[in-house]
Image (spheres, rainbow, N blue to C red):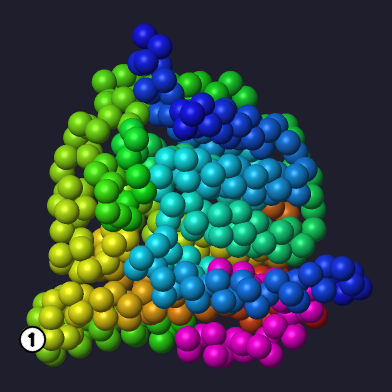
């Protein structure tokens, strides 16, 4: 697809809005439809689109597979870390109420952090899977 | 009678799709097509759950002032996570297909059996 | 109005599934599967499951299709071979019997959209009533996903992570030499 000028120009204008939309979905998931799962998939779709148009090597410069691997584990770690933080603060595992002064504030913070962990893991796992599939054909 | 049919139409189509997926899985030899059959099966299960969660004249489960009736949010949560897990497992299945192709040179079930002398 | 859209979309999905069954070109099948996913996403919007529709559109119609096309590029043969050695009526018989049993099971299930169905009466009213006062989150799907059922979601995230690792183990490295078949 490297020589297709129209596709490249359209995609270049599309990718930034897709990334902003992914961030919106991630952090607005409390109030409207959305959340970590959707945001992660949309963000990875933006990078996959980039890699389809400009080649895998260019995309791997944006996020190297090593970084993606670290991020994938980091997301799970954030999720579990929130659970252990609540235990250390005297609550049950994943009971966010103890994270802040009031119950609602604590729940809000907990949900935000957990969704962040989900988004990071889903995005980087999707990217890793895509890189593995696309990289298999390389000599 | 008509009400009964309309009330159960969703379930019947979900079962029909499930059976089409099942038929593809057991009657076709191409591994990629088998995976697509499994995916159709999976979507039919999603449909069944979401059908059960729907309430007539209900709204999407986002609390808004002045709305009294909402759909059931619990099946939505279950299916939402199931979709993402589904794509991860599909990717795993496709990766296995790629390895099978590299090892056997084919993705047709019959030919793989022939090479193994086990048919 | 919703009901008619619902009926038409379900009929379209059934037709697409039959087309997938009859096609032999793998590329056409993959494209039809993308259409199938997209139709189901639209159907989820009609049935008020906006979060699910969102995910299905991004995952089913987007990422799955890309992965399947990537697989096809590696596999290189595009036609499914037929017919198979075994008899075609046997799977058909199995499918008909299973389908008949399942349809028999639906006969006394509550009708579509019934607000008094048992599924509507168990824990869902609690979530809808308490979500704002417990967590302050208006989107009940998010509050159930991340807070009430946080353990579930933790498990799902770990499953996604594990699947990613498994894919990397299987096809992660570059292909240095063609793998030999094992000895006969």
- Dot 1 falls on a residue whose secondary structure is loop
Q: Report the front residue among C143 and B80.
A: C143
- In the figure, is residue B1 to the left or right of A58? left
Tag 1 residue: A90
Residue displayed at 28% across by 46% down: B67
Q: Is residue C140 above or below residue A64?
A: above
- State the image quarter where residue A33 is shown: bottom left
> Residue A134, image x and y in percent?
70, 73
- State the image quarter where residue C69 is shown: bottom right
> Residue B113, image x and y in percent?
64, 47
Q: Is residue A34 visible to us here?
A: yes
Tell me the quarter of the image containing the N terminus of chain B: top left
Q: Is residue C98 above or below residue C66?
A: above
Q: Which residues are magenta?
A: A42-71
Residue A48 in the magenta stretch? The answer is yes
Q: Report the front residue among C1 and B8.
A: C1
Residue displayed at 44% across by 52% down: C50
- In the figure, is residue A103 to the left or right of A35? left
Q: Main secondary structure of the magenta part?
A: helix
- State the image quarter where residue A50 is shown: bottom right
- In the figure, is residue C114 to the left or right of B83? left
Tell me the quarter of the image containing the C terminus of chain B: top right
């Amino acid at each position: 697809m490297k020589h297709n000028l129209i596709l490249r120009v359209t995609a270049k204008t599309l990718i930034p809005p897709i990334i902003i939309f992914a961030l919106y979905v991630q952090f607005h998931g409390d109030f409207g439809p959305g959340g970590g799962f959707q945001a992660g998939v949309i963000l990875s779709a933006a990078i996959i689109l980039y890699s389809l148009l400009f080649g895998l090597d260019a995309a791997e410069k944006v996020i190297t597979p090593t970084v993606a691997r670290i991020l994938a584990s980091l997301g799970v770690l954030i999720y579990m870390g929130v659970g252990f933080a609540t235990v250390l603060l005297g609550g049950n595992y994943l009971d966010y109420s103890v994270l802040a002064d009031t119950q609602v504030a604590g729940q809000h913070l907990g949900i935000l952090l957990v969704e962040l962990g989900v988004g990071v893991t889903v995005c980087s796992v999707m990217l890793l899977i895509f890189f593995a599939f696309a990289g298999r054909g390389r000599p | 009678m008509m009400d009964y049919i309309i009330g159960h139409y969703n379930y019947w189509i979900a079962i029909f799709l499930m059976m089409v997926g099942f038929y593809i899985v057991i009657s076709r030899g191409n591994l990629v097509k088998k995976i697509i059959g499994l995916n159709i099966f999976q979507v039919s299960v999603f449909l069944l759950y979401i059908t059960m969660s729907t309430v007539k004249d209900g709204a999407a489960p986002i609390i808004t002032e002045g709305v009294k009736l909402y759909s059931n949010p619990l099946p939505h949560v279950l299916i939402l996570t199931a979709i993402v897990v589904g794509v991860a497992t599909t990717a795993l299945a496709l990766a296995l297909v790629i390895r099978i192709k590299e090892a056997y040179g084919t993705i047709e079930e019959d030919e793989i059996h022939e090479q193994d002398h086990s048919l | 109005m919703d009901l008619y859209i619902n009926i038409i979309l379900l009929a379209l999905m059934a037709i697409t599934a039959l087309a997938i069954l009859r096609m032999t070109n793998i590329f056409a099948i993959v494209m039809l599967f993308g259409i199938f996913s997209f139709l189901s996403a639209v159907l989820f919007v009609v049935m008020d499951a906006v979060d699910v529709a969102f995910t299905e559109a991004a995952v089913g119609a987007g990422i799955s299709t890309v992965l399947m096309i990537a697989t096809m590029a590696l596999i290189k043969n595009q036609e499914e071979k037929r017919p198979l050695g075994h008899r075609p009526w046997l799977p058909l018989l199995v499918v008909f019997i299973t389908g008949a049993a399942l349809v028999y099971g639906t006969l006394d299930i509550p009708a579509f959209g019934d607000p008094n169905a048992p599924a509507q009466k168990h824990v869902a009213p609690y979530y809808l009533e308490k979500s704002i006062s417990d967590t302050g989150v208006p989107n009940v799907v998010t509050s159930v996903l991340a807070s009430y059922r946080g353990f579930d979601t933790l498990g799902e995230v770990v499953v996604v992570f594990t699947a990613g690792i498994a894919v990397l183990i299987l096809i992660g490295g570059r292909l240095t030499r063609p793998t030999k078949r094992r000895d006969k």
